[in-house]
Image (cartoon, grey):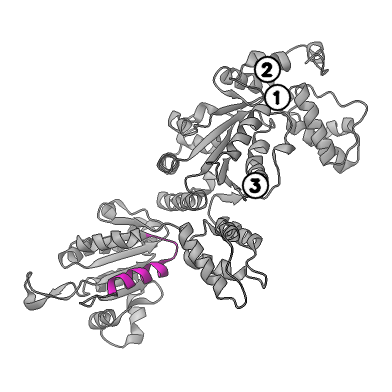
Amino acid sequence: MELLKAFKAARVAAVPIVAVSCFDPADVIKKIRASNEEGAKTPIPLVQWDAMDGMKGLNTAGKAAVAAVLKGDEKDWPGMTSNPGAALGFMSELPGEQREGGRPDGAIQMRGTIVFALNLHNYFEDRPSKENAPIVQGVWNLRDRFKANRRTLVVLGPGFKFPAEIANDVISLDVPMPTDEELTAIIAKEVSGVAGLAALDEKTMQSAVDAVRGLPSAFTVEQVSRMSMTKEGIAIDELWERKISTMEMTSGLSVDRGTETFDDAGGLDQFKTFGLRLVKSEKSPLLYVRIDEIEKFLGGLGGGGNAGDNTGVSQDALGVFLREMEDNGWNGLIALGHAGAGKSLITKGLANTASKLTGRRVLSVALDLGATKNSLLGKSEERLRTLFKVLKAVGGKRVCFIATCNDLDVMPPALRRRFKLGMWMFDLPTRPQKDAIWKINLTKFGLKKPARLPDDTDWTGADIRNVCEQADLLGCSLDEACNYVVFVAKNDPDSISRLRAKADGKYLDANRPGVYRAARQEELVPSLDAPTQGRAKVSTDEEV
């Protein structure tokens, strides 16, 4: 395990303060304890601290060390050390490395104490500086004292943002989520523990591993697997549901539960062709991550005429986003276009289409970067890093980001470059595309096609869907339903024209092969400020 190797190296180098980012501190303590005690010729005092139980020894040497420092009645120890400031003071008195005769070249009689501090970071990340100052000072005081005789303070928690006073004195280690090999071993163990159940065949085991991949810890996988056991075997669907529920506990992350596929979207033929090749490829994504209206999040950076974010939260989030995409080799695409042009619908359909064609369940999640923000920079960083850790565990290097956008002015060039699958322009549908959209939605809402459809000039695909939905809900004709729908393109023609001008010659066309050309689009869908009779001229399939 890489963590154990790194921790051993830190001990050899007499590193005094180590921060271990993990979701299951108990498992980490268990593994570090086992690796240090197994075959040890000299005792190592192991001590644990938390805000409820205070300081306590984990092994014989640790219990003796705590007793020597605290003295008095053991039942009083939690009250004496539950306060982190007081506890740090007592920690400084725990025994360091002891050599025979007190000489540097003497034989080692006892190794330096290892102190596991659970969630100590909460006391200096989330409190006003006046309150956290003693805690920060207490940790800093341990640095040189612990280094002098090879003692180690191990801070455990889901993520950290250390204050400047000690940030450069802490070595950070990260515990990744369970690997596929570890997941396989855990599931096999749980299956073997149920009387009468046979071992899972290779295909079923792969399905089970897919279903639990991304759960935060081995403990969680064990619990979820155990709860999903039946007399017939392991219930894969239940594993998925429990994983999805766990994933949605992550700030800023929600799993798409819709059933949309490419069949639910009319038109957009070129994007569909691209999407089908993507989902059928050997390296097809295992996880699609949607970011709707990414410009709303990026507005906090101060671009696009916004006042900007002077807390540093948005800037840090962007930096983390860029780094994670680069380091993990993640790819993505940008869907630019008018509201209601099908960006969200078609991108939601990627995962379900992939699942349908490959037989392997592929998830789509919605990423709300704004939900990870907190007024405290440290807490925002912790949330964001936890979120990306979940994405990496679920999709590995096969994660695809899909950002929908209505305004690219606020999107930094560095971020655009990460989306190497292209920037796609979604324009208003042409006549044949509208016909396909009408057919899909009339069928979806159980409506009969009238002898004459409403005049859908300058309508988006969403407008057609909304009219059909209103007609179904109100039990009225399509023409009557038009009175209860706001048509976006008709009401804001200037924004349509501006977006077309920005996309001209720069973006891929979602409707047809090649680069998007505004002039070509206007030949098929007349410009919004054209005379009414000009628009009517292209209202038949033959003339399109």
Instruction: Please tell me whether residue 457 belongs to the stretch shown in magenta.
Output: no
Evaluate if marks 2 and 1 touch, with contact meaning CB atoms under 8 Å apart: yes
Helix, strand or loop at mark 1: loop
Which is the main secondary structure of the residues drawn in magenta?
helix
Q: Which residue is mark 1?
A: 428
User: Per the image, is 32 magenta?
Assistant: yes
Q: Is residue 292 visible?
A: no
Where, by quadrant of the figure, is residue 225 drawn? Answer: bottom right
Q: Amino acid at mark 3?
A: Ser
Tag 3 secondary structure: helix
Which callout, 1 or 3, points at the residue further toward the start of the chain?
A: 3
Using a 10 Å C-alpha cutoff, classify the residue at mark 2 as few (fewer than 14 neighbours), some (14 to 19) or many (20 or more).
Answer: many
Residue 355 is marked as 3
Q: What amino acid type should be assigned to the residue bearing mark 2?
A: Gln
> Mark 2 — residue?
521
User: Which span is picked out in magenta?
Assistant: 21-37
Residue 347: image x %, image y %? Answer: 63, 38
The residue shown at (46%, 53%) is 386
**Distance from the alpha carbon under mark 2 to that under mark 1:** 9 Å
Which residue is painted at 54% across and 33% down in the image?
Answer: 333
How packed mark 1 is, by other alpha carbons closer than 10 Å (few <14, some 14-19, many 20 or more), is many
Q: Is residue 189 above or below residue 488?
A: below
- Picture quadrant where residue 207 is located: bottom right
The answer to whether residue 105 is above or below residue 319 is: below
- Picture residue at 24% right of the left edge, 60% below the top: 9
